[in-house]
Amino acid sequence: MKKKLLGLMVLSTLVVMGCNNGNDQQTQVSAQNLAINVAKDDVKNQIQLPNFVSLVKQVGNTVVNVTAEIPSQNNAVQLDPFADLFGKFGQAIPTPKPQNQIKRSMGSGFIISKDGYILTNSHVVDGAKKITVKTTDKQELEAKLIGNDPKTDIALLKVNANNLPVAKIGDPDKLEVGEWVAAIGAPFGFTNTVTQGIVSAKGRNLPDDSYVPFIQTDVPINPGNSGGPLFNLNGAVVGINSQIYSRSGGYMGISFSIPIDIAMNIAEQLKKFGKAAHGQLGVQVQAVTDGLAKSFGLKSVTGALVAQVIPGSAADKVGVKTGDIILKVDGKDVADSMSLPLMIGSKAPNTEVKLDIYRDHKNITLMAKLKDGQSAVNGNSSSDNDKNLNNADVLKLDKFGITISNLDADDKKQLKITSGVAITATNGVAEMAGLMTGDVILSVNNQSVNNVKMVKELLGNTTTAALLILRNNQQMFVTISVN
């Protein structure tokens, strides 16, 4: 900036020297004003990096280190300690040494109440015989495990203390992608370590973690950070650091945090009941594709398409139907099929939820009271839908590339269905759509079918249709189109 300003001042001097009229002074003033304005624009366009000093001073004392002693019985055969040294030259002789060992798990946590309630990760303290919490003023306090919830990876601890500093709880919904955040914890045992970064994404669904819409950041997180807080620039906790994506075991630029609102909801349940329960709506859903959206007359590709309603479930009791598209839960948009389990599972059983549903080109609202998520999904024990199919009344629909057959009463009883026709052969369009021999067509464009004649009539002159099929005890919609 100094070079640019100097250059402009030299330019203004040259202009003055080259003029021999009464406007010399005015020209010099204009050039100087130009230089000042450019300098101001440069300052304005610079990215202002945040200063975390005041944040750490303000909230650092709410963060604690958590050490869990986990007993483990080691009955495995132990190799000679020098086996690795001599492995290339001879075979090590195993010596059985059963041992009772104590494994120490180290993590982080933060204080959420003055009387000693602390949040951390479930995986930090799971199975622990003894838990010790160390504060920033070097106090070592024995902690009691109030409860933990592996499904959300949340654990609630309690220490016998009073007037503890308490972390301020923030609102993850107001968190924006690109916003600066900071983590405080004990990576690799290095206590009170501060790292910073930005929010990379929100609502990440990870494998086997369908109950948590993770906050993704590029904040350096390593073993020992687990259970520690993720702060926004206002010093409020917006998440709990839980997982990293890594091929080496260390930080590789992608970290995941549990939104604090979900964590506090689970903590409240753990405090009251010692365990957490997750609400269940009782539907199986699938993604709304562009083809399915057009088939149902939906203007945008959004929501979760109900492929099956579990009998006796919360959804069944309030009249949710197969083919419904759930657009909102309690006024919040259901962006896709993966979002619905997150939204429902984060709520407690017996919670009443408002469902905005798209059905038959109309929007309807239903109120459902969630059940306990531990209840099992009913299903058919048979996995071969193509067994004992009735080959009478076979109809070939060349336009769509399928051959269909009626089902008799025994077929339907075995498959535990009351209607439907079997697909006995596929080619062309049907194969491209993903239909398979042995699939059972339950409905066409949300209308149940009980024989091949009904399928033919419903398909009629249409070129695109949404078929609800049964395959290996699972219901799903498939779009079939001759275009």
Image (spheres, rainbow, N blue to C red):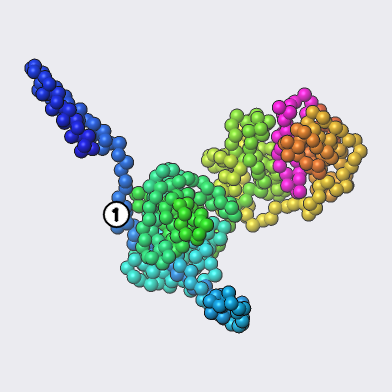
Q: Is residue 473 part of the magenta span, yes or no?
A: yes
Q: Magenta segment, principal secondary structure?
A: strand
Quadrant of residue 57 within the rendered picture: bottom left
Quadrant of residue 455 within the rendered picture: top right
- Is 108 placed left or right of 481 in the picture? left
| Farthest-out residue, front | 89
Label 1 secondary element: helix
Q: Position of residue 4 (x, y in %)?
A: 22, 34
Q: Name the residue nearer the viewer: 15 or 105.
A: 15
Which residue type does callout 1 highlight? Val
Which quadrant: the N terminus?
A: top left
Residue found 77% across the figure and 33% down from its top: 428
Can residue 421 be seen?
A: no
Can residue 330 be seen?
A: yes
- Is 467 placed left or right of 162 in the picture? right
Residue found 79% across the figure and 35% down from its top: 427
Residue found 48% across the figure and 72% down from its top: 104
Q: Name the residue nearer the viewer: 413 or 75.
A: 75
Residue behind mark 1: 53
Label 1 crowd bin: few (<14), some (14–19), many (20+), radius 10 Å: few
Residue found 19% across the figure and 32% down from its top: 7
Q: Name the residue nearer the viewer: 319 or 123.
A: 123
| Farthest-out residue, right | 392
Part of the protein shown in magenta: 459-483
Q: Position of residue 177 (x, y in %)?
A: 44, 43
Q: Name the residue nearer the viewer: 318 or 379.
A: 379
Which quadrant: the C terminus?
A: top right
| Farthest-out residue, top | 21
Q: How many marks?
A: 1
Q: Is residue 89 part of the magenta span, yes or no?
A: no
Q: Position of residue 448 (x, y in %)?
A: 77, 36
